[in-house]
Amino acid sequence: MTSRWNYVPSSTDSQNLENELAKRFAKCPPVLELLAQRGIHTVEDAERFFHPSLRDLHDPFLMPGMDVAVDRLNQAMGSKQRIMVYGDYDVDGTTAVALVYRYLQSFYSEIDYYIPTRYDEGYGITTKVIDEAAAAGVKLIIILDCGIKAIEEIKYAKTLGIDFIICDHHVPDDELPPAVAILNPKLEDSTYPCSHLSGCGVGYKFMQAFSISNGIGTAELEGMLDLVAVSIAADIVPMVDENRVMAYHGLKRINSNPNMGLRAIIRTCGLSGKEISITDVIFKIGPRINASGRMQSGREAVELLTARDIKDAAKLSLAIDQYNQDRKELDKRITEEANAIIEARGEHENDKKSIVIYNKDWHKGIIGIVASRLTELYYKPSVVLTLSNGLATGSSRSVQGFDIYSAVDSTRDLLENFGGHTYAVGLSMKEENIPEFTRRFEEYVAKNILPEQQTPQLDIDSVISFADITPEFVSTLRLFNPFGPGNQKPVFCTRGVKDFGSSRLVGRQGEHIKLELVDDTSGKVFNAIAFNMAQYFDYIHKGGKFDICYTIEENKHRNTAGNLQLMVKQIHING
């Protein structure tokens, strides 16, 4: 689907750049524009941005409830109470559990962890698990990446003498569970400076506060930032503030001395010897960890991430890799089936603003991925439902700028449970409520979605010429890593480029174009790749000028000179 190109130049007045900063990058005007877009106007801000420091992490005790949570944990450990670390089965939940469990296990032996199964137990805590915990003598449950809506379950746990510390980052309801402490930067009265932590990030802040309260050094905990980086990337939280600091140092750890389980995954997915980026975590490492919870049990992911024996890690990694292969096959089949239903309904051509689709036989672990695929393909907020434990259970995904959490919340009287974020929500309902849910969900979306949210938009950071792509510019561009929401990889536009004369079709069916491009400002030839854009080849090959939007990529093999390649996102033919 072709996107609308959107570029708003930064005016000199609005940039309000400090003179010293403007002088420093006078030879690289695009850098000044990129910094201004990120709210960076002084040399001091630029230094913090280009060189993230762990000293810039916020005091964990600024988070409401942190002092109470640390006191309760210290009390449990001091009186030898049994502790359970409980978390969700996705990447964020399993990395959070692995981090908190492994860190506390260094100081305390009366501790275990629990990951629910997606199919038998579902999302969140259940009374069945609470009963089992009580029978095992557990007195404190630290629940990670879930729990913010577990009101009745935590009330029940209190009757059995079990306390809860909730470490969550999902949007809370007006009523909160009666936990001893709730650590959630999205609480209405929270003044914590970074409101968009991942679930694992909240767990890290809890352990950071625990360390401070007990006078423990930071080296061991900072060595676990690789797990936080994986959670930040996989959960697609904003790459700003301390998220960016933790992701930066976590990536350094992944590339130098990663967790043994991560090292095994890196080897399994062919990333050994390469410079691993956030993109690699999102598309290669994260999906393998996620596949464990989607296809079998998230507990295996925690076993891998807490492994201390290289042979055990390698065995677990291969099993999880197989889950990922199975997941891919299911994903492809269910997406094709969903598309066939939508095509048969004619929904790709009608005026409906949303998609709600249900098949009781679809695999519960895949429907979130399918919802993402449908949203990308049709550019509409999408809900995909299947039958699980007698309820229609689903996942929803949204388009840029549209709050799907509010859309689902408007139907809460039809739902048994729901929770999530602005762009992704999980939900369940009785099967007979699907038609009314579909009607009301569409009604809400149609009333609230804006025209510009119904068309894909490609945001351009800077319009440059090939002469601007200097070694100094490319070197500075590296310092903008790591990328993510709030600090996306810069997208550039160059107008009036043309084929140097050697571009060619590549791919099994000649569907891609391998380009060698020049423009009128520079004699340098730039390599580029345009995936699935073969329709432009004849025009390009004849020497016609055209505009491109692209990102600048470098060869990621370590110890190899960085060869630049332009990753073309879209092409516009002049005229």
Image (spheres, rainbow, N blue to C red):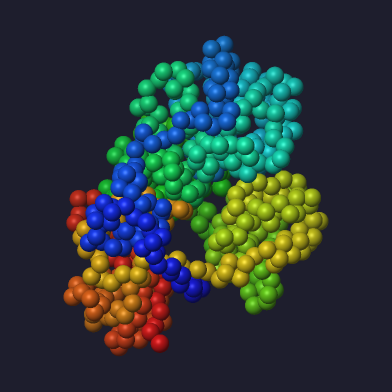
Image coords of residue 521 (percent x, y): 23, 76
Quarter the C terminus occupies? bottom left
* Residue 341 seen in render: no
**Considering only vertical position in the picture, is 490 above or below 289?**
below
- Relative to the observer, which residue lies in front, 271 or 153? 153
- Relative to the observer, which residue lies in front, 486 or 261? 486
In percent of the image, x 78 and y 52: which residue is there?
414
In percent of the image, x 44 and y 47: which residue is there?
240
Image coords of residue 161 (percent x, y): 70, 19
**Considering only vertical position in the picture, is 201 above or below 396?**
above
* Residue 397 seen in render: yes
**Considering only vertical position in the picture, is 513 above or below 469?**
below
In percent of the image, x 23 and y 70: which residue is there?
467
Image coords of residue 145 (percent x, y): 57, 38
User: 541 left or right of 241?
Assistant: left
User: 369 left or right of 574?
Assistant: right
Please give the count of numbered marks on the rendered protein: 0
User: 322 left or right of 141?
Assistant: left
Quadrant position of residue 553: bottom left
**Considering only vertical position in the picture, is 249 above or below 505?**
above
- Relative to the observer, which residue lies in front, 99 or 342? 99
